[in-house]
Amino acid sequence: MPCDVIVGGFFGDEGKGKIIAYLSLHDKVDIAVRGGVGPNAGHTFVINNNIYKVRMVPSALLNKDTTLMIGAGVVIDPKVLFDEIERFSLKDRIFVDKNCGIITDAHKERDRAKDLKERIGTTASGSGPANADRALRILSLAKDVKELSNYLKDVSDEVNTLLDRNGKLLIEGTQGTFLSLYHGTYPYVTSKDVTASAICSDIGIGPKRVDNIMIVFKSYVTRVGEGELRGELSREEAEKRGWLEIATVTQRVRRAAPFDFDLAKRAIRLNSATEIALTKLDILFPESKKVREYSRLSDRAKKFIEEIEDRLNVNVTLIGTGEDVFDIIDRRNEKL
Ligand code: IMP
Ligand code: MG
């Protein structure tokens, strides 16, 4: 499969970062390119007890043979980007599209205003105000920033050329389907569409070039910020079940609810998902922790997976069973 898109199926924080990190190491990806909104995203993944947290650069960074790119649709906070380039020594293998938007301190300031931070519960990363300025066509682009000059590329041209020669492309979505500006729980959403079609548009490839769309669902649903969350548990109940999480970017406590089949069904349609990655199975079924073979899962864990496949009519091909990137059951050989 030369071209895979990875998207979130709920409200972000489904564990895309870990899934992408695994795929980039396992599948020998030539280029990993990220779409989505901007530094409002936060991905965490763990390998050999080392914790990685990224907001701007692709989560595929662990594979040193992979070239990393950021698509034109993304808004960049240069401070966050340079910090991550430095931290992960990415200087020679990361590129940003010349048309990426640029977030300034003024955008962050506007994002901290009561109206956005409190009413919507934004991440205050400046992403929304930058996209608003882009719609007004007053936003600066990456090509206007001197410090970025060594990193500029026409990302659309790069990725299309890679596909022309049958190379392997991994397209990273951020946020989650129901944070989409168009298809989510408006107004409690992010500042752009974030479904698979939008992610492809962000990087500049047409829909016919995609082979595979992997949607990531967590075994339960979480959300930060405001907006509807069906079946929401009390904080005490979430804590009791071990579902209480802290957000990567904002450090807020995530609200939690059980796996929502109706929402998942809608997400599959909105993204035309061809396969499902299910994360954090071990939180629901502790006996499945670090299991790496399907046959070794407990009956109740298998029943949950089978119910997902039956009700959603899409195969569950990757199953996360622990925090390490390789705590995963990979069923793609038997399922695709
Ligand atoms: P904004 O994207 O910072 O404008 O925030 C709008 C809404 O989307 C808020 O509820 C945020 O918490 C949420 N949001 C944005 N990005 C992410 C993400 O990567 N994970 C989870 N929630 C997010
Ligand atoms: Mg996150």
Image: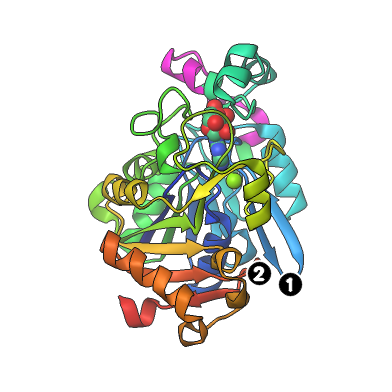
**In the image, residue 305 above or below residue 174:** below
| Mark 2 in CB contact with mark 1 (< 8 angstroms) | yes
Q: Is residue 301 above or below residue 17?
A: below
Picture colour scheme: rainbow
Whether disc 1's CB lies below 8 Å from ligand 2 is answered no
Residue 253, located in which quarter of the rendered image? top right
- In the rendered structure, find residue 186 and report the number of the disc placed on it: none
As drawn, is 329 to the left or to the right of 103?
A: left
Q: Nearer the viewer, residue 108 or 93?
A: 108
The residue nearer to you, when weighing 1 against 11, is 11
Give how far across and how far down residue 134 sits, in percent. Answer: 46, 19
Q: Position of residue 91 (x, y in %)?
A: 68, 51
Residue 22 visible at all: yes
Report the residue marked by disc 2: 324
Residue 108, percent across and down? 66, 21
Query: Where does residue 130 sit, x and y in percent of width and height?
Result: 54, 21
Q: Is residue 88 above or below residue 227?
A: below
Residue 48: assigned label: 1
Q: CA distance from mark 2 to mark 1?
A: 7 Å
Residue at horizontal 59%, vertical 25%? 121
Residue in view at x 65 percent, y 13 percent: 113
* Magenta-tinted stretch: 131-148
Q: Which image quarter is the C terminus in?
A: bottom left
Residue at position x 60%, y 74% in the image: 326
Residue 137 drawn in magenta: yes
**In which quadrant of the rendered image does the N terminus lie?**
bottom left
Q: Amino acid at mark 2?
A: Asp
Q: Secondary structure at mark 2?
A: loop
In magenta stretch: residue 206: no
Q: Residues within 10 Å of mark 2 (few under 14, many from 20)?
A: some
Q: Amino acid at mark 1?
A: Asn
Vertically, is 31 above or below 107?
below
